[in-house]
Amino acid sequence: DTGVSQDPRHKITKRGQNVTFRCDPISEHNRLYWYRQTLGQGPEFLTYFQNEAQLEKSRLLSDRFSAERPKGSFSTLEIQRTEQGDSAMYLCASSLNGVDYGYTFGSGTRLTVV
Amino acid sequence: ILNVEQSPQSLHVQEGDSTNFTCSFPSSNFYALHWYRWETAKSPEALFVMTLNGDEKKKGRISATLNTKEGYSYLYIKGSQPEDSATYLCASRNNAGNMLTFGGGTRLMVKP
């Protein structure tokens, strides 16, 4: 297992289009997180899965955003009707259960909405 | 909502200098404090996860301390090297949820 992979690495889309990103976590990790990072800021929490269950979702997340993790393996994050303000780095991370485990992050998907 | 603050925002040091950064976080309902290193064009990499007040962890030339009562953590780098150049992120988790709240990071640049 080579770590957390995200696809695509970069995405340029026109405003109003829908985009979907994929994250493949480390196979033994049952927890999966999506974060968004904009320039000069730290990563901002979007949503969290334990296995296939979406257990937490940021109150800041608009209903244009949806995430799934079917079968508790890979996850997808979809943004509908993209806006320029959605331009950011979208990071996926996975971890084992337990407080002593740090997150393993993917390299992120950089979204640019033009 | 947690507010996690890091200072300084950026730091330029010479190779061989020792340096430290600060992370402050709400002390109420504290659960865990994470430190990550994020090099340009790479993934954030976990450095430390700390939970106990007074805890100190070390990894090579990098060490971290934790004060949960007053809500701060320090990250120290001894004898900085150019390969230490990165953004250092801290993140706090409280016992109300499973997600981390990140600070804005400290960007370290080490000049040879």
Image (cartoon, grey):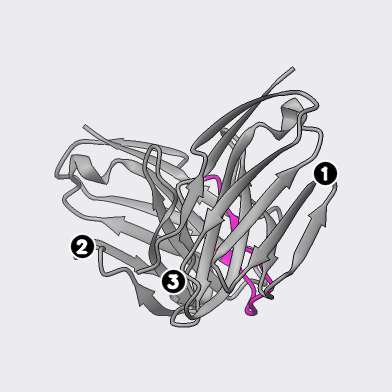
Does residue B62 appear left or right of residue A36 in this picture?
Answer: right
| Residue A101 visible in image | yes
Residue depth check, mark 3 versus mark 1: number of the one nearer the observer: 1
What is the spatial separation of the Cα atoms under label 3 and label 1, in whole angstroms? 33 Å
Q: Quadrant of residue A113?
A: top left
Q: Is residue A97 magenta?
A: yes
Q: Magenta region, mostly helix, strand or loop?
A: loop
User: Callout 3: few (<14), some (14-19), or many (20+) C-alpha neighbours within 10 Å?
Assistant: many
Q: Which amino acid, by three-letter code, is at mark 1?
A: Arg
Chain at numbered mark 3: A
Residue at the extreme right of the image, as rendered: B60
Residue at the extreme top of the image, as rendered: B112
Q: Is residue B42 magenta?
A: no
What is the spatial separation of the Cα atoms under label 2 and label 1, in whole angstroms? 42 Å
Q: Quadrant of residue B55?
A: bottom right
Chain at numbered mark 1: B
Q: Which residue is at the front of the view, A10 or B96?
A: B96
Q: Pointer 2: what residue?
A: A62
Q: Which amino acid, by three-letter code, is at mark 2?
A: Ser
Q: Pointer 1: what residue?
A: B61
Residue B52: % across, % down:
69, 75
Label 3 close to label 1 by CB (< 8 Å): no
User: Callout 2: few (<14), some (14-19), or many (20+) C-alpha neighbours within 10 Å?
Assistant: few
Query: Which quadrant, please, contains the C terminus of chain B?
Result: top right
Residue A25: % across, % down:
58, 62
Q: Pointer 3: what residue?
A: A48
Q: Which residues are magenta?
A: A94-107
User: Can you say whether B15 is above or below A81 in the image?
Assistant: above
